[in-house]
Amino acid sequence: MAIQTKHKLLIFWIIMLSFIAFGAWHSEDMETPFWAMWTVPIIFLFVWLLFDCIFVDDKAFVFDHDYENWSRRMDPMY
């Protein structure tokens, strides 16, 4: 599976936000948890990337509510 442009963009933003979160964790004022604020979009983007790689493909996830259409597409002996 080739890495699409969307996946490259998501990986880029995950890495950039990780650097920002790491920089906020090592700030002068350790009383304020700014690093936790920056981990929320990192987690969101990581789950988005994971879901996109697993389920969003032309052949990976097919939902058809009519069983006859699904069986014609999937069963070679139909």
Image (cartoon, grey):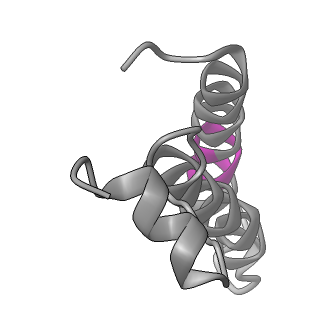
Give how far across and how far down residue 36 sits, in percent: 66, 77
Tell me the chief SS of the magenta region. Answer: helix
Decide if residue 27 is on the left or right side of residue 3. Answer: right
Against 52, is 7 above or below?
above
Give the residue drawn at x 58%, y 38%: 58
Give how far across and how far down residue 53 sits, in percent: 48, 44
Q: Which of 24 and 41 is in front in this view?
A: 41
Q: Nearer the viewer, residue 47 or 71?
A: 71
* Quadrant where the image shows the N terminus: top left
Residue farthest front in this picture: 78
Count of marks placed on residues: 0
Give the residue drawn at x 59%, y 66%: 69
Residue range corresponding to the magenta coloring? 18-23
Give the residue drawn at x 51%, y 59%: 61
Query: Which picture quadrant has residue 26?
Result: bottom right
Give how far across and how far down residue 65 sits, in percent: 67, 84
Give the residue drawn at x 51%, y 57%: 55
Give how far across and how far down residue 35 sits, in percent: 66, 68
